[in-house]
Image (spheres, helix red, strand yellow):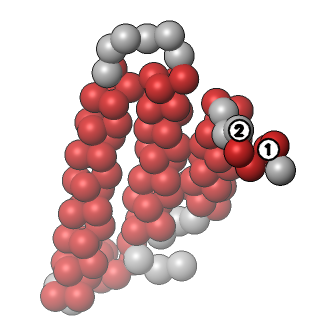
Amino acid sequence: MDLLTNIGLYHYLVIAILLFCIGLYGLLTTKNIIKTIFALGLMLSAIGLNFVSFASFGDFKSVSGQSFQIFLVIISCVQIILAISFVVAAKTLKHKKIKTVFKK
């Protein structure tokens, strides 16, 4: 029961490593551009979790980890907008080159 009450830096780092590895696996194994963008977003989330956990558990008196996380959230939002624009372009345009990007 002591493990559940004392959550430390180690636990956050293990979760971040798992998220990063899942994102890296998705990045390396897929050829679909949408899945690649979401895998990159998952990797950026793991990096942001590392920034925030080191900033909160360290002896730092600045908010640099949180400011980096806000920057990474903005990048993730741009990635999602890019993925949605790819889907809309594939649905509206009937061009063969765009259709080949989304093949499995």
- Residue 99 in the image, given as x and y percentages of width and height: 34, 81
Residue 78 visible in the snapshot: yes
The front one of 34 and 5 is 5
Question: Residue at coordinates 33% horizontally, 20% vertically from top-left?
Answer: 64
The image shows residue 104, relative to residue 13, as above or below, that is below
Residue 6, numbered label: 2
- Residue 60, by quadrant, is top left
The residue lying furthest to the left in this view is 92
Residue 79 versus residue 89: which sits nearer the camera? Answer: 79
x 74%, y 49%: residue: 4
Identity, as a three-letter code, of the amino acid under mark 2: Asn
Q: Whole-percent x and y of residue 79?
A: 29, 56
Figure disc tally:
2
Q: Dots 2 and 1: beta carbons under 8 Å?
A: yes
- Residue at the outermost right position: 1
Within 10 Å of disc 2 (Cα), the crowding (few <14, some 14-19, many 20+) is: few
Residue 17: x and y in percent read 66, 41
Check disc 1 and report the residue beneath it.
3
> Which residue occupies 21% across, 63% down?
81
The crowd level at tag 1 (other Cα within 10 Å; few <14, some 14-19, many 20+) is: few
Give the side of residue 102 with respect to residue 16, left or right: left
Residue 95 in the figure: left or right of residue 65: left
The image quarter containing residue 34 is: bottom left
Q: Is residue 5 left or right of residue 35?
A: right
Classify mark 2: helix, strand or loop: loop
Residue type, numbered disc 1? Leu
| Relative image position of residue 20 (x, y in whole percent) | 60, 46
User: Would you identify the image quadrant in which residue 85 lies?
Assistant: bottom left
